[in-house]
Image: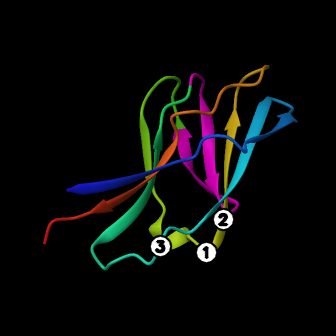
Amino acid sequence: MATHTIRLNGFWIATPLPTGMRFTRPFGKPRTLDANETVWIVGSLPTIGTIQVNNTILGNFAASTPFAFEITNRLASRNQIAFDLVTSTEVAIDGVVLEIRRSED
């Protein structure tokens, strides 16, 4: 399987929540996808949390454990990713990427 990676560094907006912090970031839909390509959000964060794309919860993840969520069918031309983290301080949201995965024919 071939993969193209798009880094989501910078531009994160932190907002306090009653149980932690929300980090949001806009992003554009990757180029026109071929029929055998899918888009994934992949990464690992230092605390537990929930991930959303365009206000739809994708799921939960554990602290310092790699996660991967397929989002191809949830994408619009402009999108927003949100992490609701259980933490009392700002966390560096680095290492979170979009992966365009191409399945072998």
Query: Mark 3 or mark 1: which comes first in sequence?
Result: 3
- In terms of secondary structure, what is the magenta stretch mainly? strand
Q: Which residues are magenta?
A: 46-60
Q: Tell me the crowding category of disc 1: few under 14, some 14 to 19, or many 20 or more residues within 10 angstroms, Cα based.
A: few
**How many numbered discs?**
3
Residue drawn at the location 80% of the way across and 29% of the way down? 19
Q: CA distance from mark 1 to mark 2?
A: 6 Å
Q: Tell me the crowding category of disc 2: few under 14, some 14 to 19, or many 20 or more residues within 10 angstroms, Cα based.
A: some
Residue nearest the viewer, comparing 65 with 35: 35
Secondary structure at numbered mark 1 = loop
Q: Is residue 50 magenta?
A: yes
Residue drawn at the location 55% of the way across and 29% of the way down? 45
Q: Quadrant of residue 66?
A: top left
Choose mark 3 or mark 2, whichever is in front.
Answer: 3
**Looking at numbered disc 1 in the image, what kind of residue is underneath it?**
Ala
Secondary structure at numbered mark 2 = strand
Query: Mark 3 or mark 2: which comes first in sequence?
Result: 3
Q: Which numbered tag is attached to residue 76?
A: 1
Secondary structure at numbered mark 3 = loop
With respect to residue 82, does 14 lie above or below? above
Percent position of residue 24, x then y: 73, 47
Q: Which numbered tag is attached to residue 79?
A: 2
Q: Is residue 72 magenta?
A: no
> Horizontal placement of 37 versus 47: left or right?
left
Q: Quadrant of residue 103?
A: bottom left
With respect to residue 69, does 12 lie above or below? above
- In which quadrant of the rendered image does the C terminus lie? bottom left
Check disc 3 and report the residue beneath it.
31
With respect to residue 59, does 35 lie above or below? below
The extreme left residue here reads 105
Residue drawn at the location 49% of the way across and 32% of the way down? 44
